[in-house]
Amino acid sequence: MSESDSGTSTRLGWAARSWRNLREAGSVQLGLTVLLVCAALFIARYSWVLPGGTVATPLTSEAERAFYDLRAYYAADLVEEDKRVVLVVYTDQTLIKARKRSPLDRGLLAEALRTLDTFEPKAIGIDILFDQPQDEDEELIAALRGMTTPVAVAYAATATNPDDIEYEQQQYLERFLARLEGSKAQPASIRLDNTFGATRLWPDIRPGIPPLLGRVMLAEAGEARAAFAGYEGAIDYRRAKFQDSVLFPPAQIDLFVDPDPEILPFLKEQFAGKYILIGGDIVDYDRVETTFTSINGEVPAGISVHAEIIAQMLDNRVLQPIPDWVLWAMAVLAILAAILTALLEWPARWLAVVGIAQLVIFQGFPVLLQLRNVDTYGLPPFGWFIGWVIVYAAITSTVRASGAVQRNFATGALGKYIPRDIAQAIIDKPELLSLGGEKRAIFVLFSDLEGFTKMSHAIPPEMVAKLLNRYLDMLSQVVLDHGGVIDKFVGDAVVAFWGAPISRPDDGARAARAGYAMWQAGEAFRREVAAMDASLPPIGKTRVGLHYGEAVIGNFGGANRIQYTALGDSMNTAARLEAANKALQSSVMASREFAEASGLDWWRMMGRVVLRGRARPVDLFEPAPDFPAEDRAALAEASVLSVTDRAAAVRLVEGVAGRHPDDSALGNLVQRMQQMDDGGTYVLG
């Protein structure tokens, strides 16, 4: 078979397995997955607005606008002051001086127009509605009719600007504009698009409404841009190159009313051949939220937006619209990417890399388009992300459901030979079967049944097997119930550990409780055997040793036979602690390392000994959940005094033992305290 045939076969095998996994999830699960995929596709396509284009999509639309504003802000051109467009504004101070709050004194405006006309600008746009009568109307009309400069006069209608003008005001405005017919003054719409609370787009073109203010000014100046004749896309806002500068520095209208003749040549030099916009820059009136407002917090005057529109036309910055089929294609691509990612049989780290790469691509693509002067308003990268997440979650959930039966079967079958948690780990991560180990700090438990070997010689083999199986079953269940790993059985001995292959914060507490519960299970087994057959030899007690330390954990063996186990001195120490119980007349004994790492407060100090075959002494601790706190403290104090004042230490322990006359382990401790060496240590024979 050629390499190409092998690759094709592999791909087909993966596809077949993926389809089988989805199909075996069941019709209900599969149907729900299909519905979620369809819903995700809908979100990926219509994350801005619902079909019809007028109603914002709940939840996602606001996020899409935020993403658009962010990329538009940082992709915007950084430019110096734009000297082609000049703003002549009236401010709060202008109105205070004129003693008119609103509208602006039209006599003042007439004087300013006559002055500006002498500067020979390209065109003048007036962003002021003359919708109410004023004493100076005749003077203003005369000034407008006498202009040699083309003038675009603001127009608004109740149909398009219901918040700005009422019916009676519109009637007066139309009569005012009618008196300008035959002059250089032309009506121009000042309507701005405020969809979703901010002016991000050019206003749509409606029949019966004059062209936009900027369009009229460029047309009258002979610089009309054909590419913008029907443009309704995004406003391509720019940012000032320097922090403290503005794109269109405003000049107060007062400057052009009865100006000093000496400064007229200077003013003419500044305003000749420019596009002049006249309007208000009032603190609380005619302010416009733009694409940049959510980023920089600035709410400019409406006249500044008209200036940006004029500059966009002068620069021929036509943002190319994205075809509808591209939006559908990208939505489908995002959904397919999620499906394929969910079905990939790769390790989690590689899936994370793939997911992050897709996130970068799908979120970076709109930024790249924005930088290349493509209109990304309406492009839904957040919808792609949400759709991707929904589909990925739906597919992975379906695959997980379809594999539940097979996984349970495999775990159960494998769990008959190795611990179930290790079996689960191997199923989840097959590479765990590789040979080798790692050093880990673990909690080790070693148990043994006293006298079972001697008893096994006195009863039939089949009874030995029955009792041993029952005993090991009870102790194994204790280990598994407490989250431990059964390392091995050595006759009637059980070896278990906590902390590998998966460590938990409460492994020490689990191991400690398991050791105590194992002794209790052994006592229950003794009672069960006694009740079973009175002729059976008495069963001895279960002894448990507990230690915490480092060991090498992993799979050891050969290619055909491996065992997951722990190796190291910690295992030997636990075994010797278990054996020491006989000499100590106790049942469960732990090292100081184990007791302190367990996090439990039920331990009582039981002296210091040198274990059989060991050189280093071990501090002994015994679990005693119901032991009085004052006695526990006395034993701890005796342990400290044993090094400096043996007699005092012995008296303390004798006092505690006297209060618990039936506690054989405490009696043994008294004897050991009397025989310990100068270092406060007793050597076990």
Image (cartoon, rainbow, N blue to C red):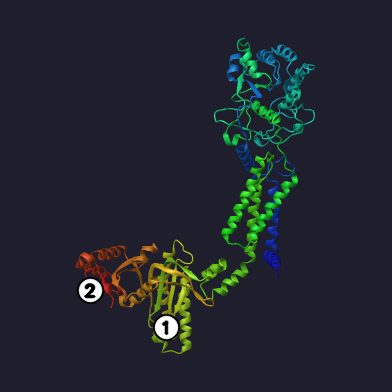
Name the image quarter holding the C terminus.
bottom left
Q: Nearer the viewer, residue 269 or 326?
A: 269
* Image location (x, y in percent) of residue 298: 58, 31
Which amino acid type corresponds to the residue marked 1 in the rendered image?
Answer: Ala
Answer yes or no: is residue 94 visible.
Answer: yes
Answer yes or no: is residue 90 visible.
Answer: no
Q: In this view, does 151 lie to the left or right of 353?
A: right
The CA distance from mark 2 to mark 1 is 38 Å
Residue 241 numbered tag: none
| Residue denoted by label 2 | 675
User: What is the count of numbered marks?
Assistant: 2
Instruction: Indicate whether 466 appears above or below 342.
Output: below
Instruction: Indicate whether 58 appears above or below 264.
Output: below
* Image location (x, y in percent) of residue 647: 19, 68
Instruction: Indicate whether 616 appears above or below 247.
Output: below
Q: How crowded is mark 1: few (under 14 residues within 10 Å), some or many (20 or more)?
A: some
- Disc 2 on helix, strand or loop? helix
| Residue denoted by label 1 | 530
